[in-house]
Amino acid sequence: MLTKQMVVLQGERITAVGAEGRVTLPVGAHVIDLSQGTVLRGLIDAHTHMFNTRGPKTSTEAAMLIAVQNVQADLGAGFTAARDMTSHGNGYGDVAIRDAINQVASTALVSGIHAGHRLECYAGHRACKPAGQHGRSLG
C-alpha cells in the first residue's frame, strides 16, 4: 500500500500520479484529501444485464427504475464502466440510460465534478456481435 500519493486530474483525464513532492500541482488546483481512504482505478463490468427479464405485468417505468438501481449498484461497487448486453425486452431502454449517464457526466464536468460512470450498450437481437459474445454495439 502506497501512502502520501497524488493523482492529478485535468478535465476527465489523469495527467500525473506519484509521490507527494514529486508531482506538481497546477496553479489553482482543487485539492481533495483522500488520505483516510483508498484510491483505486475504476473496475469494468464487461458483461452485465442492467434490466431484469421483464415479467408480463412489469411496467416500462418499473423496469427502468430497477435498471437505474442496478447501474447505481454497479457504480457503488466500484465499477466505472459497464457493457450492457441486452435490455431483456425493454427495447432501447439501455441506450436511454447510457445517454442519461453521458448527459449527467458532461454537465457534472462543467461543474468540476465527474460522475464517473460510462455505459456501452449492446442489443442481443442484432446479427453483428463481438467474437465470443452476444450483442452489437449501439454507440
Image: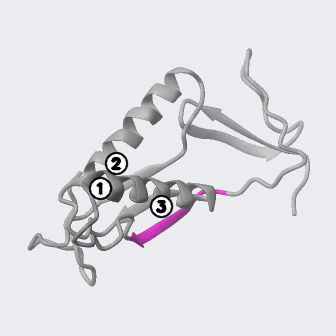
> Is the C-beta separation of discs 1 and 2 under 8 Å?
yes
Please report the residue visible at 25 percent of the width from the left and 67 percent of the height from the top. Answer: 57
Instruction: Give above or below for 125 relative to 61.
Output: below
What separation in Å lies between label 1 and label 2 (alpha carbons)? 5 Å
Residue 60 or residue 111, whichever sits in front: 60
Q: Chief secondary structure of the magenta span?
A: strand
> Is the C-beta separation of discs 3 and 2 under 8 Å?
no
Please report the residue visible at 74 percent of the width from the left and 23 percent of the height from the top. Answer: 30
- Report the coloring of the rendering: one colour
With 61 as the anchor, is 18 left or right in this view? right
Magenta residue span:
41-48
Query: Which residue in the structure is indicated by mark 1?
Result: 94
- The disc at residue 70 is 3
Question: Regarding mark 2 in the picture, which secondary structure is present there?
Answer: helix
Q: Position of residue 63 (x, y in %)?
A: 33, 59
Would residue 46 be counted in the magenta stretch?
A: yes
What separation in Å lies between label 1 and label 3 (alpha carbons)? 11 Å
Would residue 16 be counted in the magenta stretch?
A: no
Instruction: Give above or below for 10 relative to 90.
Output: above
> Is the C-beta separation of discs 1 and 3 under 8 Å?
no
With 117 as the anchor, is 49 left or right in this view? left
Question: Regarding mark 3 in the picture, which secondary structure is present there?
Answer: helix
- The disc at residue 97 is 2
For badge 2, the amino acid type reads Ile
